[in-house]
Amino acid sequence: MNLKNDISYRWIIFAAFIFSQLVLSIAGFGWGVLAPFFKESMSLNSTQLGLIGSTFYLTAAFSAFPAGIITDRFGVKTGFLLWLGLTGLPLLFAGMVQSCFILFLLIIAISGSGYGMGNPVSSKGLFLWFDKNTRGLVFGIKQAGVTVGAAAAGVLLVYLSRKFGPFIALVIIGSFISFMFVVVFFLYRDPVKDNNLSQSDTKKSEEPEQKPSAFFNLRSIMTNRLFLYLCIIMAILGLLQGIIVTFFILYITESHGYPLMMAGTLFSTIMLSGAIGRILWGLTSDRLFDGRRKPVLIIIAALAVFCITSLAFWSAALPKFLLYGIAVCVGLSALGWNSICLLMVTEITDKDKTATFVGLASTIAWFGLACGPLAFGILTDYYGYYISWITLAVICICNLILIFALPISKTADSNI
């Protein structure tokens, strides 16, 4: 890797990951956009509409861990092709089952299992192709593709659904993903050699390479305290992300009477800030903190405490422009944390188990994202928004304390 004749090629690989992430995220975040069209064309109720998204994300959560094991054992290219193939190919058949909701859910479940492979596959691929001083930036740009794809879904899928119907829209998106499958099949190759590894990476490369076991070693998880801490942190940040995405618009419209158009603008501000944050935090870690990740994670957690506390005490009498500032902070923290956390996971684990650990961490984060909105909704129904936001702020404070307590050794600190 990173031989002179590979310097340019690694950016081609990077572009393949970015475009794949972008088009896959249109599918992954498009179910809410398509819901009104499915409701009309399939005569679905609210429970059935909710079941579509839940099915997709639940299978995504369960697939991340085994996807990491597959990627570590059979290589990044195999994982990359499975990521694209299992997500995109089922969507090509969506139009054939529009009269049967059960079969449609089965297709959604298969597609979701492919989508969940993204983090372990892309994280290991970028880890292998880029050195310590550039990983933060490329991880951030890759993760920014998720929120950019989500924003694009709101425009592209509405246009396609109005013009051709929601099922043809899915077929078109599935075609784009299938095209990327063909491109990756002929384009992707693993790096040859790495001459720009960090000191710890060099030590790893000098060790004899061992073929990863077909079965994941549970002991390697339980003895890696830093990884366990990171899993808890990612679950809390995932919980925060799920709550913001689900309840922010409802909160400012129902509790403070802001118009829906302004609420939508604020939500777009959050999404855009999240995309910028995923790049900004990686660049900050690489350049300002010389590749150390923990200081950046502390800043993210502190921003989360500030903005969630501000939302709890917010009053409609305050100037509206201040709320836009809070929305920026929400995006930078609640949606901007992913790249740094995933990068930390890749840098604290053995090279031959990178994707496996990223997959497990992603699964835990997905469960946090799925459980957060439900818990917040129940709390709001019983006690109101104020208590709900205060509770979330307390959780964010605990998360900040946990980050300060990350058990980073002197050797590890030079890397993260």
Image (spheres, rainbow, N blue to C red):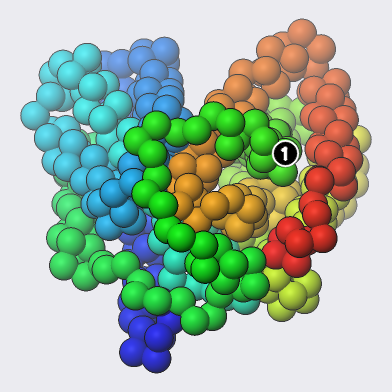
Q: Is residue 76 visible?
A: yes
Eyeballing the image, is 364 above or below 17? above
Measured as percent of width and height from the top left, residue 98 is found at 15, 24
Q: Where residue 128 sits in the image (x, y, percent)? A: 45, 66
Up the image or down, 67 lies above or below 210; here it is above
Residue drawn at the location 27% of the way across and 42% of the way down: 87
Say which quadrant the C terminus sits in. bottom right
Q: Decide if residue 152 is on the left or right side of residue 276.
A: left
| Residue receiving disc 1 | 225
Instruction: List x then y, in percent, for residue 142.
Output: 48, 62
- Along the line of sight, which residue is nearer the eye, 388 or 136? 136
| Name of the residue lying farthest toward the top | 382
Where residue 70 sits, quadrant-wise, is: top left
Provide the secondary structure element on which disc 1 rests. Answer: helix
Which residue is depicted at the point 78% across and 72% down? 289
Reply above or below: 49 against 401: above
Residue 235 picture quarter: top right
> Seen in the image, is 383 located left or right of residue 371?
right
Res. 150 visible in picture:
no
Residue closest to the eye, 121 or 393 = 121
Residue type (three-letter) at the residue carrying disc 1: Arg
Q: Residue at x 75, y 67 (%)?
A: 414
**What crowding class fits label 1: few (fewer than 14 Cα within 10 Å), some (14-19), or many (20 or more)?**
some
Q: Is residue 214 left or right of residue 267?
A: left
Q: Judge left or right: residue 222 versus residue 123.
A: right
